[in-house]
Amino acid sequence: MTKRSRKKAVSKATQAKSRVEALGLPAISETMLRFAKPLVDLVGLPPDLRAAQSLMVITTAAWNLPLLEQKNHPEAPKVAAALESGLERMPSAVRETVEGMLRSRMTTFGDDPRIGVADVKPNDRGGLKVVATASLLGG
C-alpha cells in the first residue's frame, strides 16, 4: 500500500466514522446484541464460548445480509448461502426467528447503515464479551 492510498483509506474511514457519529448510533456491539435478542430469548444464553461464537456468526450474517442484498454487493450470495446452509440443520423455530431478524434489519434497524462483524471472547472476569467492528458499504 502506497502512502497516498493509505492516506485515502484513512480519509474514507474518518468520513465513515463521522457519518455514523452524526447519526448518533450506539456502539455496534450494543446494537448487535439487541438485534440478537430474539435468538437469545429462543435458545437461551449460550453455555460456552463456542456456542456463543456460533450464535454471533448467525447474528452477523442476519445483520449484514439484507444490507448486502440491498446494495447488490458481490458477497451477498455467499453470505446467503452460508446462512441458509447453517439454518438447514436448525430447528424450525430458530429458522423462523432468524427470518424475523432479517426483516427487522430493514425495519427496526433499517436506519443503521453499518455492516458489522461480531465475535465473542472471554473477558477478564471469567465470562464472555461481544467484540464487534463496523464498516460502511460504498454505493
Image (spheres, rainbow, N blue to C red):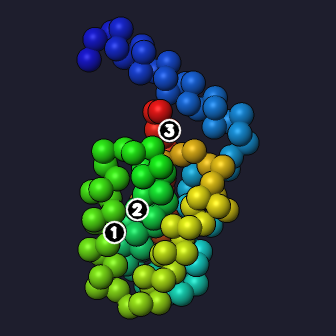
Pointers 1 and 2 in contact (CB under 8 A)?
yes
Q: What residue sits 47% from the left and 90% below the top?
A: 93
Q: Out of 51 and 62, give the one closest to the viewer.
A: 62
Q: Is residue 21 placed above or below 86 in the rendered structure?
A: above
Task: Farthest residue to the top: give it.
Answer: 4
Q: In the rendered structure, which amino acid carries the disc numbered 1?
A: Leu
Left or right: 132 as drawn, with respect to 106: left
Circle 1: element type: helix
Q: Out of 10 and 115, give the one closest to the viewer.
A: 115
Mark toward the start of the polypeptide (1 vs 3) = 1
Question: Residue 7, percent across and down?
Answer: 42, 13
Binning the other alpha carbons within 10 Å of mark 3 as few (below 14), some (14 to 19) or many (20 upward) gives: some
Mark toward the start of the polypeptide (1 vs 2) = 2
Q: Out of 84 and 38, give the one closest to the viewer.
A: 84
Q: What residue sits 42% from the left and 73% below the top?
A: 55
Identify the residue under disc 1: 83
Question: Residue 2, percent across and down?
Answer: 28, 11
